[in-house]
C-alpha cells in the first residue's frame, strides 16, 4: 500500500534567519519518461513557511533489508522571489510517515545603481580663483 510523507518549506534570509514571505515554492519530480510532474505550488506566509505538502513515499516494508528499494522518494524544489536569487534543490528526500522541514536560505539580489534609494548628487560650488 503506498504511503505518504509531508514536506514543509521554510524560507529565510540573513544569518539572523529573517523569514521571507511571498516566495513561490514549487515541488515536482521526474516521471519515468523524463517529464516533470508538479505536485504543489504555494506562496510562503508571513513566517516564511508553507502549509504541509503531502507527497507519495514508498511503503516502509519494501525497504527493510539490504538490496531492497530506497526508503524515500526524491523530489525537486524551486523557490523564487523577485527580490532574491532563485533557489533550487534536487533529490529532496521524503520518507513515509515523516514530516520533513526543508530550510531554504535566500540571497538578496543586488540593488540597481539607479534605484530610488540613492541620494541626490552633491553639487560642488565653484572655488574662487
Image: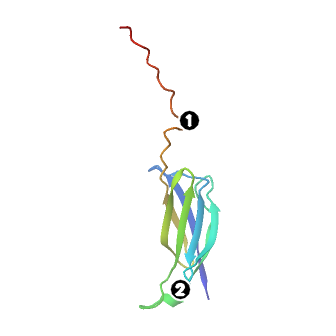
The answer to whether residue 85 is above or below residue 60 is above
Q: In the rendered image of this protein, does residue 23 appear above or below residue 28?
A: above
Residue 58 is tagged as none
Rendering coords of residue 20 (x, y %): 56, 52
Marks counted in the figure total: 2
Residue occupying image coordinates x 56% and y 58%: 80
- Which residue appears at 38% of the width and 8% of the height? 128
* 48 and 121: which is toward the camera: 121
Q: Based on the displayed image, in which of its 4 quarters is residue 43 positioned? A: bottom right
Residue in view at x 46 percent, y 49 percent: 16
Q: Nearer the viewer, mark 1 or mark 2?
A: 1
- Point out the image quarter for the N terminus: bottom right
Q: Earlier in the sequence, mark 1 or mark 2?
A: 2
SS state under label 1: loop
Q: Circle 2 sits in a helix, a strand or a loop, which is it? A: helix
Q: Which residue is mark 1?
A: 116
Q: What residue is shown at x 54% (from left), y 67% (from top)?
A: 77
- In whole angstroms, how far apart are the C-alphas of marks 1 and 2? 56 Å
| 120 and 90: which is toward the camera | 120
Q: Which residue is mark 2?
A: 60
Indicate the position of residue 99 as horizontal and vertical percent values.
56, 71
Crowding at dot 2, Cα within 10 Å, few <14 / some 14-19 / many 20+, comes out as: some
Snapshot quadrant of residue 38: bottom right
State the quadrant of the C terminus.
Answer: top left
Q: Which class describes the residues within 10 Å of circle 1: few (<14), some (14-19), or many (20+)?
A: few
Most distant residue in the top direction = 129
Amino acid at each position: 500500500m503506498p504511503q505518504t510523507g509531508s514536506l514543509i518549506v521554510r524560507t529565510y534570509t540573513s544569518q539572523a534567519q529573517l523569514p521571507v514571505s511571498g516566495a513561490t515554492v514549487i515541488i515536482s519530480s521526474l516521471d519515468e519518461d523524463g517529464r516533470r510532474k508538479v505536485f504543489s505550488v504555494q506562496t510562503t506566509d508571513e513566517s516564511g513557511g508553507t502549509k504541509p505538502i503531502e507527497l507519495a513515499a514508498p511503503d516502509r516494508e519494501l525497504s527493510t533489508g539490504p538490496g531492497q528499494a530506497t526508503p524515500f522518494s526524491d523530489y525537486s524544489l524551486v523557490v523564487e522571489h523577485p527580490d532574491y536569487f532563485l533557489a533550487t534543490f534536487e533529490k529532496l528526500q521524503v520518507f513515509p510517515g515523516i514530516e520533513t522541514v526543508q530550510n531554504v536560505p535566500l540571497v538578496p539580489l543586488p540593488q540597481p545603481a539607479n534605484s530610488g534609494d540613492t541620494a541626490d548628487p552633491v553639487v560642488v560650488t565653484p572655488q574662487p580663483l
